[in-house]
Image (cartoon, rainbow, N blue to C red):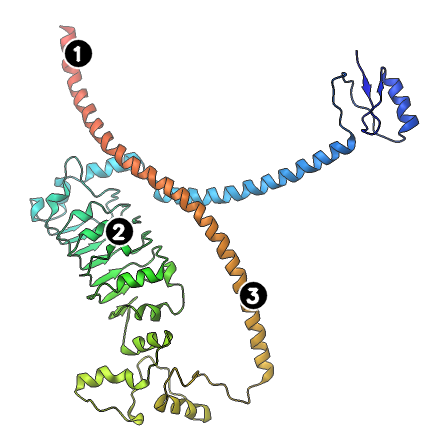
């Protein structure tokens, strides 16, 4: 039996016929919505007000879900880009392993035996793998002193670590993230590993014979760790470290020179003045007389130069026009301590106050912008953590693929042997 219920929670009266419900609307609820379709006694009819609230809530939830979905799509897009960069298929690994044969390596050199090879250049060979294969052992390449593997797609350097006599290694433009295995190459003197994904160099602390290092355009972040590691290399002469996260600070050059003494940094020759500036940035007192001490010792002159005999550094700007400000600056350079004498950019007293006010306003705007950038930086770091987790998963998958590739290579050979034997078995069956 059908029952008609008033849809309003304050009423909810029951009627046997629809006409009685219509009369009830006219008497009790003027200008109200039409009643719902016929329902049974077990139906739970919501009021129009409740329905309206539910729709509003659903709409809000939908908007939130759409926003979350958009954010997830952006994150997944970044992860997909990263995945495309590092994903290596099993076929690529197998192809690379098949390419690494004794015949292939000897064809790249003038040697007939692997033991005679001292220099090996394998640039742009589409290599995903440089390690032991079923037909090649890294121990056979024990006499290699120079190895170039740039512009390939290597992710691991474990195989290279077996080359104990290696003196120079070039792995520029690859996908290497960890160079810790190279710590076994104790004779290494030159390491070129630019344009990779290296995050730290703390794992190569034992390579004390290094004379030249190139690590441009990697992902090295910890400056203190990097500087203390580089300080362990007493013979280091040339260093390229720019375009890494740890080198974004504008004083990076002098911060690094406080720990490390090199002849060339990022392609620029270093002179004694640079080291004095590095000490000055760290708060140590440095006088201008120290700038020429090294040259004087070389010339055998132990007497300190007179103030008028001071030589201008080669990196100094053009001469300042002699005036009141220039004379004050000259006195500070000749007789005073650079750091203790106060700032060299002394501002004359007659500076326009309005100009100073404008500068202060610009300074405030810059401070606000810096605060905004710090907030954005924190958000990007959160996203980076998420991407790092996904990246680690993908890295594990690559490792699993490497292991599976070894088995697949063996299975492929077994399959070829079985195919060769198939005609023999067919002949036996026909007999």
- Judged from the image, the secondary structure of the residue bearing numbered disc 2 is loop
Residue that badge 1 annotates: 426
> Which one is nearer the viewer's eye here, 98 or 270?
270
**N-terminal of the two: label 3 or label 2?**
2
Marking on residue 179: 2
Does label 2 or label 1 sit earlier along the sequence?
A: 2
Image coordinates for residue 79, horizontal then vertical, percent: 43, 43
- Left/right of residue 152 with respect to residue 6 in the rendered view: left
Q: Is residue 118 above or below residue 272?
A: above
Mark 3 vs 1, N-terminal side = 3
Q: Is residue 277 above or below residue 170?
A: below
Instruction: Look at the image and tell me whether residue 296 can be seen.
Output: yes
Q: Name the secondary structure under disc 1.
A: helix
| Residue hosting label 3 | 368
The answer to which image quadrant residue 78 occupies is top left
Picture coordinates of residue 193, whole percent (x, y): 27, 55
């Amino acid at each position: 039996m059908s029952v008609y219920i008033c849809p309003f929670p304050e009423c909810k009266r029951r009627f046997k016929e629809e006409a009685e419900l219509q009369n009830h609307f006219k008497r009790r609820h003027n200008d109200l919505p039409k009643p719902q379709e016929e329902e049974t006694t077990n139906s739970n009819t919501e009021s129009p007000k409740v329905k309206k609230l539910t729709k509003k809530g659903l709409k809000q939830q939908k908007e939130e879900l759409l926003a979350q979905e958009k954010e997830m799509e952006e994150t997944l897009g970044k992860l997909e880009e990263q995945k495309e960069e590092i994903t290596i298929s099993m076929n690529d690994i197998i192809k690379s392993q098949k390419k690494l044969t004794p015949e292939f390596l000897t064809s790249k050199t003038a040697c007939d035996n692997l033991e005679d090879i001292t220099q090996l250049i394998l640039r742009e060979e589409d290599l995903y793998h440089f390690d032991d294969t079923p037909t090649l052992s890294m121990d056979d390449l024990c006499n290699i002193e120079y190895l170039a593997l740039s512009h390939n797609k290597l992710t691991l350097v474990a195989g290279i670590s077996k080359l104990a006599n290696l003196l120079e290694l070039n792995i520029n433009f690859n996908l290497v993230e960890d160079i810790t295995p190279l710590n076994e190459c104790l004779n290494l003197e030159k390491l070129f590993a630019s344009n990779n994904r290296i995050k730290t160099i703390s794992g190569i602390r034992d390579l004390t014979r290094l004379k030249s290092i190139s690590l441009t355009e990697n992902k090295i972040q910890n400056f203190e760790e990097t500087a203390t590691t580089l300080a362990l290399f007493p013979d280091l002469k040339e260093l390229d470290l720019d375009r890494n996260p740890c080198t974004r600070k504008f004083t990076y050059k002098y911060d690094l020179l406080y720990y490390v003494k090199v002849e060339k940094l990022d392609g620029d020759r270093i002179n004694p003045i640079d080291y004095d500036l590095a000490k000055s940035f760290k708060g140590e007192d440095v006088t201008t007389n120290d700038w020429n001490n090294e040259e004087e010792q070389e010339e055998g002159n132990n007497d300190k130069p007179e103030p008028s005999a001071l030589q201008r550094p080669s990196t100094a700007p053009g001469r300042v026009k002699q005036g009141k400000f220039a004379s004050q600056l000259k006195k500070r350079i000749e007789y005073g301590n650079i750091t203790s004498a106060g700032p060299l950019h002394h501002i004359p007293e007659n500076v326009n106050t309005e100009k100073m006010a404008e500068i202060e306003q610009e300074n405030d705007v810059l401070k606000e912008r810096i605060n905004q950038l710090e907030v954005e930086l924190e958000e990007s770091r959160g996203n980076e953590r998420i991407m790092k987790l996904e990246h680690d998963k993908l890295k594990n998958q690559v490792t699993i693929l490497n292991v599976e590739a070894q088995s697949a290579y063996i299975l492929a050979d077994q399959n070829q042997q079985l195919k060769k034997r198939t005609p023999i078995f067919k002949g036996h069956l026909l007999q």
